[in-house]
Amino acid sequence: MKNAGLTRRIVPMMACIILIAVSSGLGEAAPRVEKLNLAHVLASSHPCHLALTQFAEAVKKETDGRIQISIISGGALGGEKDEIDQIKMGALDFALLYGVSLFQGMAPVTAIEELPFLWSSREQAYAAYDCGNSRNVQLDYGL
């Protein structure tokens, strides 16, 4: 019986201590760290990978460590098509991709990049890339 009285006094006292600790800031959560994954198919010795490493370090420094980027190289997650699929599913945050051919199924207008000799002049090609003319390009060339 003597222990029951002791328990009745300790429990409220512990509750008060916890309440004071939380309200005084001792229970504050650490700043949220956002961890992102970036993938590519190049070797870790490739200059683009080295540049991405510098990019990740700069982001970490400029955000005081709140944003951290992990770089996955060498096609460890599959080819570029696999990386695009993983981005669409939310399993990967971003990727370094070369060319636009993989996007043609999602946005047919991107095929314009790979149509050689479509334009009769440099000015015509530049005009096609102008955002104001993109709808005309789609209509004119059936894209």
Image: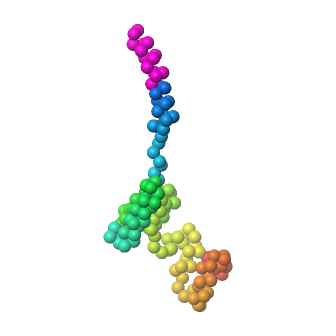
Residue extending farthest bottom: 120
Nearer to me, 48 or 3: 3
Judge whether residue 109 can be spotted in this image.
yes
Judge whether residue 37 can be spotted in this image.
no
Q: Quadrant of residue 51?
A: bottom left
Q: How is the image coloured?
A: rainbow
In magenta, the rendered stretch is 1-14
Residue extending farthest top: 1
Position of the N terminus, as image quadrant, is top left
Up/down of 26 relative to 52, above or below? above
Position of the C terminus, as image quadrant, is bottom right
Image coordinates of residue 109 in percent, x first then y, are: 59, 75
Identify the residue at horizontal 54%, vertical 88% (top origin).
117
Nearer to me, 61 or 137: 61
Identify the residue at horizontal 45%, vertical 17% (top origin).
9
Q: Is 129 displayed left or right of 53 in the figure?
A: right
Image coordinates of residue 70 in percent, x first then y, are: 40, 59
Identify the residue at horizontal 61%, vertical 81% (top origin).
128
Identify the residue at horizontal 32%, vertical 70% (top origin).
45
Image coordinates of residue 29 in percent, x first then y, are: 47, 42
Q: Quadrant of residue 138?
A: bottom right
Q: How many marks?
A: 0
Image coordinates of residue 78 in percent, x first then y, are: 40, 64
Is 132 a magenta residue?
no
Up/down of 46 relative to 85, above or below? below
The prevailing secondary structure element of the residues shown in magenta is: helix
Nearer to me, 82 or 29: 29
Up/down of 23 relative to 11, above or below? below
Q: Quadrant of residue 54?
A: bottom left
